[in-house]
Image (cartoon, rainbow, N blue to C red):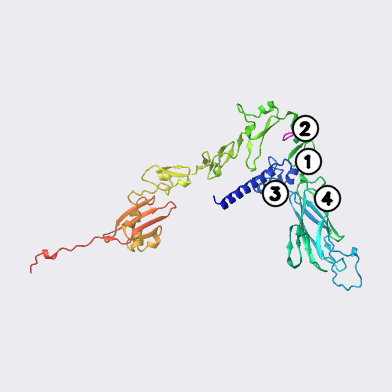
Amino acid sequence: MDPKLLLLALLGVFSLSRAQLEKKECISATSCGACIQLGEKCGWCTGSYFPRCYELRILTPWWRCDNIENPRGSLQITQNKKVTDRKDKDKAEKLKPDEITQIQPQKLSLNLRSGEAQKFWLKFRHAVDSPLLSEVILENSKLPEDVSIAYVSHCKNGVDYTGEDGRKCSNISIGDEVTFDVAITSKGCPSNKTETVRIKMQGLTEEVEVQLNFICECDCHNKGVKNSPACAGRGTYECGICRCNEGRIGQKCECSTDEVRTEDLDASCRMENGTDICSNNGDCVCGTCECKKRENPEERYSGKYCECDNFNCDRSNNKLCGGHGRCECRVCFCDANYTGSACDCSLDTSTCLAKNKQICNGRGTCECGVCKCTDPKYQGRTCEVCPTCPGVCTEHKECVQCRAFGTGEKKETCERDCMYFHLEKVKSRADLPQPGSAPLISHCKERDANDCWFYFTYTSKDDGTKAVHVVETAECAEVRWPDMSMFRWRF
């Protein structure tokens, strides 16, 4: 196998596995707080039939959710004194160190959501009255666990640096100004909800104070109802779910952990004569099946034993129940005017109406919106075409004659009456479309007023258009005069 193709295939498998892993990462969270700690791609739905954590890109378009908990980080500059702009080196009075500002801003407050970077800039201007520096290097105090910081420096002459080099700029002179982009990211929620990080330049006492406030819970967490009736009085109802007290579990905290997974309780989670617990589609909790959740929130297991689902019904045109019904317990329930195991058979007969308003011209039956002609002589979408019936050639003779030869009874009204078909001339009868080359084709031979024969074919296409192929020269019988020498002339 081509090494390049193999590499592409491996990359494809890796990408697919990575995408599947990310989906499962969100769905693994069992509370709103745990959901938002998994990263900025996850959101919690509090108002659906069953609250759950999903990727926002799936949750927003696919799931009708009354309320999505998706707190975002923010940044506020709390002290922003401008840097000192003192260019005249011959000033009589020299500024004191505490009168010089070389870093801006001086204080910030960040609200950090797990996985979402908060970015800000720092400006440094080398002041006249400060100690002489040829290089500026940023350094920061010890970071809290699972917090990272990244720098990008924008130095003189439009030169940018990243990584460790993003902390510094060289060849700095008095009056020079450089800037730094700073990004701080947290992963998870530290034990201390508030921390402070300090950033300074090596060799200078000035520093930037950055307060980090970690977003560890959703807004709905503060609205929880302790010992709520919705949780059997044994848990806190918050963000649409029960947070059970110690020793209680279940969707409604209805059972004790001491009773879970006993053999008797598992037996009530099996179908009659079955061996699978909850049909392998759920967990047995307190003797009741709690069905598993799917990555796609529109797909659900249901039933006492989780034996049903709404995504394994028959499909048509790659659509569940043909797009004309709903799937319940692996059976399609069709919308009005549709039937069939995949709801792909239309009961609407309007598509079978012939010009005479009869179903299939009275010569067939309408099945799933399509005519099935019962008379073998008739064909076409509504069983109105009869290639072997007399009259097809005669019906179109005058129009073919006027358009092909400029003669006949309709030559004066040809443009008005005879433009309903596409005309193509051929050299000879051998060039005419042959039988079987088109499904609805009639071969015609007609005589004109000059006792000449002309040949043509008339074709009705599936899209409703008509086509005529005609031999460009009519065949006229040769006129033979009697041999005058055979007669005796008397004078």
Residue 75, above or below 372: below
Q: Quadrant of the C terminus?
A: bottom left
Of mark 3 and mark 2, the one earlier in the sequence is 3
Of mark 3 and mark 4, the one earlier in the sequence is 3
Of mark 1 and mark 2, the one earlier in the sequence is 1
Circle 2 or circle 4, nearest the eye: 4
What's the mark number on residue 247?
Answer: 2
Of mark 4 and mark 1, the one earlier in the sequence is 4
Residue 283, above or below 46: above
Mark 3–mark 2 Cα distance, whole angstroms, equals 32 Å
Q: Which residue is mark 1?
A: 224
What's the mark number on residue 341?
Answer: none
Dot 2 amino acid type: Gly
Of mark 2 and mark 4, the one earlier in the sequence is 4
Q: Residues within 10 Å of mark 2 (few under 14, many from 20)?
A: few
Mark 4: secondary structure: strand
Circle 3 or circle 4, nearest the eye: 4
Residue 475, above or below 48: below
Image marks 4 and 1: residues in contact by CB distance under 8 Å: no
Mark 3–mark 4 Cα distance, whole angstroms, equals 24 Å
Bounds of the magenta segment: 248-253
Of mark 1 and mark 3, the one earlier in the sequence is 3
